């Protein structure tokens, strides 16, 4: 099989990138391969569904800019294709005096990121969210909720309708690159492409290695564990409720999320997964463990965050600890309200010097581009990320 461009990965970033290729270079043939039987099986289909506004990201950073653009683009895509979403807004709540400076700093950062925001006193918070307790909060109205799985499925359907060749159950086994082409063995297919774009998520480093690159990172999987509240609690909050993030911790904490189906979830935690696709506690992959713990950068990260990591592990195994996290701001939730809900896996790139790669990161060879890190808010930002990827290689694609 021959194609001009081959994309690996049918998560929302790979699909968005394929759509941008089709829009910008309709004359080029395009093939997409995915090892699963349908799109959005991993990170895209296992997240909280939040349309982020961009509160947390450094002003002027690519993350902040892509998030703002993605917020608007996601809503526009849903409007165009009849996908339900709800702009319910996000409330960030301080429950202790020590959190107030961090809340005020986030409020200022939201202003610097050009976001509409409204400060609420404790009394105003109680009036607007009777089940939430806090000293103060601020409200960001542009945040919302959606099903990113539905968005990805619609993207896949549009691509197929537009003549793109999509192949599922087609896992990449080997890649050979020459100066003229890339030869990919995927499932029972040998695909010869003039250019390769890899959006492989949890396996980004391994796909890059297949091409012969030496990645300056390694993927470390973190499992985000959620609970779902019973239907009787579907109206417990009107907005998305977030705690103030801990200083020096790269995760946002356990939050209450109104899902697009009307239910409410509690989570996620951030637990080191024992397998790259370890959605259950009992999922263990010796190969993945070796890849993690043989890498000095990951060992450094785990050592640096040992206290927080042990706390997350405790909460994962003992539900009362998890309950304590959410009761800080929503004391009416009880232990029996925390019902099982599917976990997600976050593919976190870690650098050799022991730092979490916090921004988007890619590597290139002569005939390929590899999206190596697409951290939250990658789902929100997927449409402009696709545009950014193609802009980065437009000279190469123009030459095909």
Image (cartoon, helix red, strand yellow):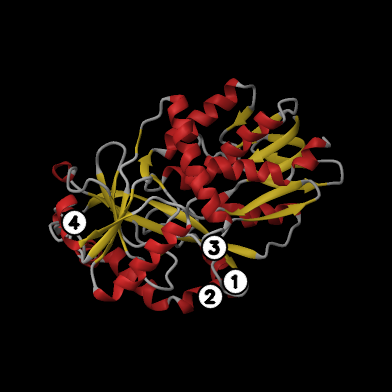
Residue 18 in view: yes
Circle 3 sits on which residue? 358
Q: Are marks 2 and 1 in contact (CB under 8 Å)?
A: yes
Q: Nearer the viewer, residue 4 or 251?
A: 251
| Disc 2 target residue | 299
Q: Earlier in the sequence, mark 2 or mark 4?
A: 4
* Dot 3: element: loop
Q: CA distance from mark 2 to mark 1?
A: 7 Å
In-front residue for pair 89/37: 89
Q: Nearer the viewer, mark 3 or mark 2?
A: 3
Q: Return the residue at label 4.
A: 124
Residue at 20% across, 54% down: 338
Q: Earlier in the sequence, mark 3 or mark 1?
A: 1
From the viewer's perspective, is 298 left or right of 390?
A: left
The local secondary structure at tag 4 comes to helix
Report how far apart the C-alphas of labels 3 and 1 lie in the structure.
18 Å
Q: CA distance from mark 1 to mark 4?
A: 49 Å
> Quick one: label 4 or label 3, which is nearer the N terminus?
4
SS at badge 2: helix
Please tell me which residue is depicted at 58% across the width and 53% down the height of the picture.
203
Which quarter of the image is occupied by the C terminus?
top right
- Label 3 or label 1, whichever lies nearer to me, is 3
Q: Residue 72, image x and y in percent?
A: 47, 39
Disc 4 versus disc 3: nearer the observer: 4
Q: Which residue is mark 1?
A: 295
- Closer to the chain start, of discs 1 and 4, is 4
């Amino acid at each position: 099989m021959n194609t001009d461009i081959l994309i690996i990965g049918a998560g929302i970033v790979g699909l968005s990138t394929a759509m941008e290729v089709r829009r910008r270079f309709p004359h080029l043939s395009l093939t997409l391969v995915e090892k699963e039987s349908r799109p959005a099986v991993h990170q895209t289909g296992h997240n909280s569904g939040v349309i982020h506004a961009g509160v947390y990201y450094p002003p002027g950073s690519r993350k902040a800019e892509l998030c703002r653009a993605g917020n608007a683009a996601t809503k526009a895509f849903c409007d165009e294709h009849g996908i339900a979403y709800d702009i319910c807004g996000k409330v960030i709540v301080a429950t202790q005096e020590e959190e107030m400076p961090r809340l005020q700093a986030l409020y200022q950062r939201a202003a610097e990121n050009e976001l509409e925001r409204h400060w609420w006193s404790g009394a105003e918070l109680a009036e607007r969210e009777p089940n939430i307790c806090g000293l103060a909060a601020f409200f960001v109205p542009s945040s919302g909720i959606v099903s990113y799985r539905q968005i990805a499925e619609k993207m896949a359907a549009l691509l197929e309708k537009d003549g793109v060749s999509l192949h599922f159950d087609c896992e990449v086994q080997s890649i050979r690159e020459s100066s003229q082409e890339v030869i990919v063995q995927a499932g029972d297919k040998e695909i010869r492409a003039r250019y390769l774009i890899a959006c492989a998520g949890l396996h980004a480093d391994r796909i890059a290695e297949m091409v012969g690159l030496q990645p300056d990172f390694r993927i470390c999987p973190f499992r985000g564990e959620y609970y779902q509240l019973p239907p009787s609690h579907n109206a417990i909050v009107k907005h998305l409720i977030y705690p103030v993030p801990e200083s020096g911790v790269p995760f946002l904490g356990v939050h209450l999320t109104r899902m697009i189906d009307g239910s409410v979830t509690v989570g996620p935690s951030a637990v080191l997964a024992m397998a790259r696709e370890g959605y259950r506690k009992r999922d263990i992959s010796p190969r993945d463990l070796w890849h993690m713990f043989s890498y000095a950068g990951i060992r450094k990260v785990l050592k640096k965050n040992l206290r927080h990591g042990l706390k997350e592990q405790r909460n994962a195994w003992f539900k009362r600890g998890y309950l304590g996290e959410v009761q800080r701001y929503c004391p009416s939730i009880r232990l029996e309200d925390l019902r099982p809900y599917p976990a997600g896996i976050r593919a976190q790139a870690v650098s050799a010097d022991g730092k979490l790669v916090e921004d988007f990161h890619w590597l290139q060879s002569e005939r390929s581009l590899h999206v190596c890190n697409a951290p939250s808010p990658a789902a929100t930002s997927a449409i402009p990320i696709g545009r950014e990827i193609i802009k980065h290689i437009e000279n190469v694609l123009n030459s095909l």
